[in-house]
Structures are given as C-alpha cells and as structure tokens.
Amino acid sequence: MMSIPAPIDTPSLIETPPLIEAPPLIEAQAVSLSRDGTLLLDSIDLSLSDREIVTIVGPNGAGKTTLLRVLMGLDAPNSGRVRRRPGLRLGYVPQRLHVDPILPLTVDAFLGLSGNRDKAATQAALVQVGMDSHAKSQVCRLSGGELQRVVLARALLRRPHLLLLDEPTQGVDVGGMAELYRLIGEIRRDRGCAVLMVSHDLHVVMGATDRVVCLNRHVCCTGHPHDVSRDPRYQSLFGREVAGQVAVYTHHHDHVHGPDGQCVVPDKGDENRDRA
C-alpha cells in the first residue's frame, strides 16, 4: 500500500494585501488667507471623506464662505495648500442666486445652462428635489425654498462626489429647513456623495450632520455635533443658552413640507391603503 507523504509547511505564496485607506476627497492643510491686511482664514485644517456630511458653523464674518471658495479653487490661499482627490467632481449651491425678474427663464431652461443636455438626468434631478412639477415654471416666480431646490438640482447634474452648500436654507421657514436637511441626507444616501455645508441654522443643523466644524477665522473646535455643542469654545462663541437649545432640538411631526415650506398632511386613507 502506497504511503502518502505528509504535507510540508511552506510560506504562502499569496499574501493578502494590506487595507489601504482612501485619501480624503478634499483636504485643507494649514490654509491661511489675508485680504487688504485683514486675516480671513488662519491655519485651517479640514478634510472630508467619502459620504460624510460636515457642517461649518460660525458667526458672520467668520470666513465660512471664504473657506468654501478656497476649497473650490476660486480663491488662492496666501499659505498652506488644498489637496483634491484626482478626478474629483464638485457640485455647488451658492448662498444667493439673483435672477432678473424680467428674464423669461423656465426651470428647464435654467438647468440647461449647466451644459447638461441629458433630459433623463434633468428629470431625475428634479424628481429627487421635489420640483418635477415645476419644470415649465418661470424661475423668477419661484419661492425662496423652491429656487434653492432648483439650484440644488442643477448641482446634482454634475454627478458630484462632493456637494458644497453655502447657506442652503436661506429664505426657508423652520419646517422647510428640516425638510431640506432631510433631502440632503437622502441625496447622500442615494448618490453616495459627501456634503460640506455652511449654515446659520444652529437649532436644526446638529441633527443633520456627521461632524461640525466651528469656525471663527480659525477652527475653534470640531467633532460630533453632541460633543461640539458642549465644548466651552463653542458655547463661548454662540452663548451657553443658544448652544443648549441647539443640542436638544428635534423636529418630529405627522406631516411633510412641500418645496415652498408649506405643511402637507398625508391623506389617512392613502396611509391605510399603503399598510394593507
């Protein structure tokens, strides 16, 4: 009977490659910027990872919009540098968009100005932001909340890896703010993009972000919203009373808000049919 030799222990010829952490989508390293002798940004360090929602908060004049412009490459820092992942696509929603009221411009035509002629992509973007029924509406007749959603749809047409939103809820009431932040979360989930927001909506933004950066020309503090709201530097900047209100605010209701911020109460019959 032939004997079978015992296996010989030998080093594996196939090695499992080490896990390589993806580089940040975008990263600011010791970024400083002065203009006309005024220091606008002082040694800013900031990075964003895939699918992360980060919100920059701070008082007026803190450099929030300036930092966005530096990250996008619109302004060059005096010192420090910004690294962007190769091939990074950005989508941008500015703080204000002025549309001449005498200019005949429909929502469809406005979105076409982005250079994207893909009708299916345009329709999908409008559906996602809840503005598909306004495709033929005049832009100048939209409410503040509706216009913000259209501008957001325009940013989505770039198929961004990173959305930059400068005060996205300007001109929107409290209920509309919560709904818009919910929409931003859905966009992150559905499209897999990261989001960097600038906001003054301290009483609602804490529940809509993964990380908060408190800015006052320099980074005062950064971290999880719950931790930042208890940071003495944050409380010093916004006041202890306001900071406490921010930390506990939630928005629970049995209705949704339309693009203009109006309450829309679901039909109970529809809800019962959905459950059946």
Image: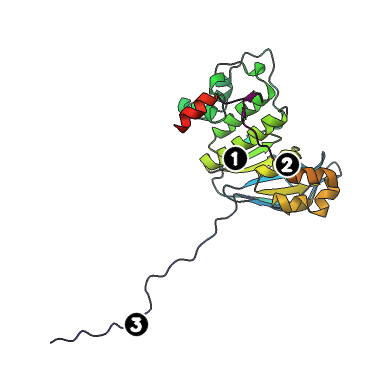
| As drawn, 129 above or below 191 | above
Q: Is residue 22 visible?
A: yes
Front position among marks 3 and 1: 1
Judging by the rendered image, the residue that carries numbered circle 2 is 249
Judging by the rendered image, the residue that carries numbered circle 3 is 9
Kind of element beneath mark 3: loop
Residue drawn at the location 60% of the way across and 35% of the way down: 183
Q: Residue most toward the left?
A: 1
* Quarter containing the N terminus: bottom left
| As drawn, 4 above or below 141 | below
Q: Quadrant of residue 238?
A: top right
Mark 3 or mark 1: whose residue is earlier in sequence: 3
Could you tell me how many numbered marks the image carries? 3
| As drawn, 100 above or below 272 | above
Q: Residues within 10 Å of mark 2 (few under 14, many from 20)?
A: some
Judging by the rendered image, the residue that carries numbered circle 1 is 185
